[in-house]
Amino acid sequence: MERLPDQQAILACRYDARWRLALALPETWQGINPSTLVYFRRRVAEHGIAQVARESGLEAMRSAGYLRRHGAVRIDSTHVLGWIAHLSRLECVRETLRLALDFLVAFGGGSAWEPWFSRYADRNPQELRNASVARLRSTLDQAGREALDVLAKTPALGDTVVRSEPVALLQRVFDEQFEITAGASLQQRTYYYFAWARAVCAACPMKDQCLSPKKRAPFRSLPVGEDQMIVQERRALCKTVESQRRLDRRSGIEGTHSELTRGYRLRRSRYRGLRKTDIQMQFTAAACNLHRWAARLCWLDRQQAMRAA
């Protein structure tokens, strides 16, 4: 909840009375090495038991009669912005290629996957730092062609390799970012960019409603993808009565999301990888449940004291 590093968390357990009381630590407790927490999270991730803390808390709440057993439970998802949120299209393709080649190097060694293995070993090569737009665009085209070459070589290794997670992810990213047109030529996905002149926007009577006051942009721009019509159809579908009826339950979900994102900072992950992110999500949910339980018990004590007075 307080997002402390491991070393500061151990110090808080030793010297902060609130932490000692919450964890029921004896006065003779001298602490542990902060690296123990690293190994603990690693073992939890390896065995896939991150949900144990959350389920243990829920079972304790059920045993105390605070939480009733449910059948169908209202659930929804929330956005978690991790490191991948900062990836550009080029970085996404290059990083996916690097992960796939790191996996494929076990089949024939690094020399069997040259020059791709050496080219994508560096995540942030010097020649791409502060590169021009034309250079980045050409590099993206090259990465797309080489991703296609790598994918064309994998079927010879068997279906198991083709269906493996790194290769399947490379195929997915390639399909999302590129398309093969007639003549087997490779093209990037089409995007259109519309922009209006500043003079036009300055004289427009609707500028106060059109221009965003937060961004303070002096003109309006509009990027449009090739799937724009599909997006508009989905937006129109969301305005129908049936869709609105299905979305009525969201009003009861948004409160929980607001509590988790504002009070527990669940919006952002502090770790790389899905397994470590899952640990953070599960432990944060457990902390939220225990905090609600403690708040309920405190409220009951206050009500009892008021009735006794």
Image: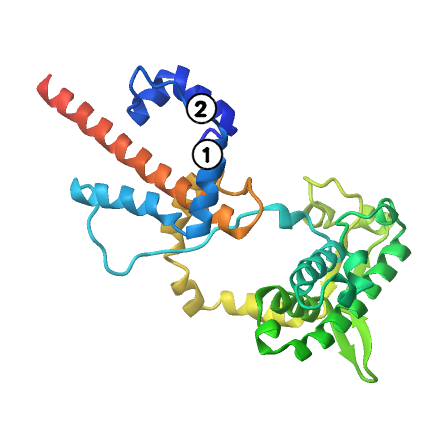
- If the image is split into quadrants, where does the C terminus sit? top left
Residue 98: horizontal and vertical position, in percent? Answer: 71, 58
Residue identified by numbered label 2: 10
Q: Between 56 and 175, which is closer to the camera in this rendering?
A: 56
Report helix, strand or loop for mark 1.
Answer: helix
The answer to whether residue 220 is left or right of residue 161 is right
Q: Amino acid at mark 1?
A: Leu
Specify the farthest residue to the left.
308
Residue 13: horizontal and vertical position, in percent? Answer: 40, 22
The answer to whether residue 287 is left or right of residue 237 is left
Q: Amino acid at mark 2?
A: Ile
Q: Between 20 and 196, which is closer to the camera in this rendering?
A: 20
Q: Report if the CB atoms under discs 2 and 1 are less than 8 Å apart.
A: yes
Q: Identify the image quadrant of residue 256.
A: top left
The answer to whether residue 237 is left or right of residue 254 is right
Residue shown at the point (80%, 49%) measured from the top left: 201
Where 218 falls versus 169 (above or below)?
Answer: above
Specify few, some or many for label 1: CA neighbours under 10 Å numbering under 14, 14-19, or 20 or more.
some
User: Which callout, 2 or 1, points at the residue further toward the start of the chain?
Assistant: 2
Where 214 falls versus 240 (above or below)?
Answer: above
Residue identified by numbered label 1: 37
The answer to whether residue 14 is left or right of residue 111 is left
Q: Between 63 and 247, which is closer to the camera in this rendering?
A: 63
Residue 278: horizontal and vertical position, in percent? Answer: 46, 49
